[in-house]
Amino acid sequence: MNDNQIIELFFTRNEDAIQQTVYKYGTRLTGLAANILRNNEDAQECVNDTYLKAWDTIPPTKPNHFYAYLAKICRFFAFGKLDWKNAAKRNAEVVALTQEMEECIPGSWHDTTVDSAEISSLVSSFLHRQTQENRMIFVRRYWYGDSISEIALRYKLSQSNVAMRLSRARSKLAAYLKKEGIHV
Amino acid sequence: MTGKDMLKGIQNMDADLIEEAEFGTFQKKQTGFSGRKKLLFVLAATLIMGTMTAAAVYTRWSTTAQTRYNPSQDVKEQAEKSGLSVMLEETKGTENPNEVLSVTDQGITITAVQSIVDNYQAEITFRIEGFDLPEDEDPFVWPTVTIDGDLFFYGAQSGGFYDGTTHDENGKWVYASTGEPVRSRDDEFQSVILDWVADDGSMEYTHYISFQETDGRYMGKEIVFTFNSIDIQGHKKLGPSIPQVEGNWELRWTLTGTGDSISVTPNAKIGDSDVVLLDAQIGQLSLRTRYQVDKYWEGWDELVTLPQGVCGVRMKDGSEHRCVASTYGFENQEKMVYFMESQMFDAILDISQVESLMFHKGWELDANGKPTIQTFYYIPVSRK
C-alpha cells in the first residue's frame, strides 16, 4: 500500500490507517525514537504518540511526504521526552551530537535566539549543495541521531571515513552559516 | 544558541532530505563493463508483441495499476490512446532503440512493465522474477533514478511492492485474490500476512515520482532506473533493510506520457469561506487548481495544505473519487494566489465525464462527537 493510499484511509477515518502505518513505518519510527532516547519503552511511547498525532491531524493535513511528516512528529516527541540534564548518564551519543553541533555555530550566534524554521532552512540549503553521499551521512548523524558505527555499517564505509566526512561537513556548515548569517 | 538548540532546531529540515537519508542508498561506482559480473541484458520484448491488437493490450495492465485504479475498458483505452499509460514491453524501441527494459543479474530478472505518466507524476511498475522471498519477510528495494542524467528532477519519490491486498466496497482490508479479510499472525505484534508473491513466483514493485517541474519537460528524455540490491525490510533499527541479493540491474528507456487535460474557470467561492476557486486543469490522473485567498495561509510553512483546497472529483454518474495534494504553495504571494497540484487516489478519470470538483465542508459526528463521514461542497465544472 503506498503512502497516498494510507492517507486515504486516514481521510475516510478507517482505523486500518494506523495498522498500515505501523506496518509500513513502525520499525523505522521506533529506531528513530530509540536513537534519541536509548530506552525502548520511552521510544515506543513516542511512536504511539506519533500515531495518535497523525490520526488527529490527518485530516485536515494532507502530508506530501508522509514518512517525513511522521518522522518529524516522532523526533519532536523524542526530544521532548529526553531528560537533557541526565542525558550524559543514559545517552552519551546525544551529548556527542550536541558537542558536534556546537562546532557548527558561528560565534555571533551564541548570544542569539534563532528560530527553528530559519535553522532548518539554512541547513537544508547547505545540504542541497553537498554531494548526495555526504548529505545522507550528515542527516543520518544529526537528524536521525545514528552513531558513527551505525552509519559506517549502513553505507559500508569505514568509521574513520564517516568521521572524516562529518568533520569536513561541520566545518563547511560553520563557514556557510557565518556567510549566510541570520535574519533577525 | 547552543549545540542542543541547533540539534533540535534542524527539526524542520526539508522533507526530501529526511526521506533520502532513510530510503536512499549510495550509488555504486561504475568501473566499466568488466565490473558487472554475470550481467546479462535480456531483450524481453519481441516484434511479435508489437503486432498485438489494441483490444488485447487494454486487458493486460500491471496487477498494481489494475488493483489500484480498477479501470473500465473505456478508461484503459483512453489512457493508452492519450499516452498516459504505456505497457513498456509492448512499445519497445519505438522511442529509443537503445532502451533496456529487462535485465537479468544474479539469476534475478527485473522488467519494466508499465508506466503511467503525466506532467505532474510518474508511476513505473517493475516485475521482479527469480527472487526467493524468505518466509514471513517483506521485500524492499530502492532504485536510483535519473532523467537525462539528472538526479534532481523530483519533488518526492516513494515506492512499494504490490502486497496482494485491497479494500472492498465496505472499506474492509481484504486479499485481492479472494476477497477474504486480511489475516494476522499469532505473534506479539499481530503482524499481518501479506501476499507479496504472485502465483508465478514474481513480485511487482512500483516507483512513484512527483516531478519537480510540471511543464512536461521530462517527456521525451531518457529515464534510468538502477537497482543495486534486492532486500527484505529490516527488523531492528540498525539499517532500514537487509540486502539479500546484490547485483546491477540498470533499465533505461525514453519517458513518455501525456499532458492532456481540460481547463475550467469557475471563479467561484468555496462554501462559506472567502477562498475563491479561480481555475482548474483536470487531467486523467492529476489536477492543478488555483485559488484566490484573502490572507496569507501560514500552514504552508508547515507542509499543511489549504483546508479549502480541492479534495475530489464528482463524475456525471454520481461516483466520487478522492485526490490528495502533492505540491502546493503560493504561486503569487503578492496577489495571494495559491495553487495545488493533486493526484487521484484510486481512479483514472474519463475527463469528459467530470461533473464537479469537491471541497471539504465538515464532518458528520457520531454520538461521542467523533467525525465519521466527511461532507463536501461541490463546484460544477463549466468548460472554458
Image (cartoon, helix red, strand yellow):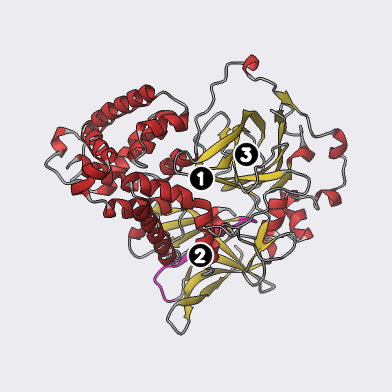
Between B67 and A17, the one nearer to me in the picture: A17
**Residue B273 magenta-drawn?**
yes
- Residue B235 image label: 1
Q: Residue at x 55, y 56 (%)?
A: A4
Label 1 marks a residue whose chain is B
Q: CA distance from mark 2 to mark 3?
A: 33 Å
Q: Nearer the viewer, mark 1 or mark 3?
A: 1
Q: Which residues are magenta?
A: B272-285
**In what element is the residue under mark 1?**
loop
Please identify the quadrant where the N terminus of chain B is shown.
Answer: top left
Q: Amino acid at mark 1?
A: His
Q: Are marks 2 and 3 in contact (CB under 8 Å)?
A: no
Which of the 4 quarters of the picture holds residue B164? bottom right
Above or below, A136 relative to B237 = above
Q: Position of residue A30 (x, y in %)?
A: 42, 50
Badge 1, how many Cα within 10 Å: few under 14, some, many 20+?
some
Asked if both marks, 1 and 3, belong to the same chain, the answer given is yes
Badge 2, how many Cα within 10 Å: few under 14, some, many 20+?
many
Q: Residue at x 22, y 43 (%)?
A: A89
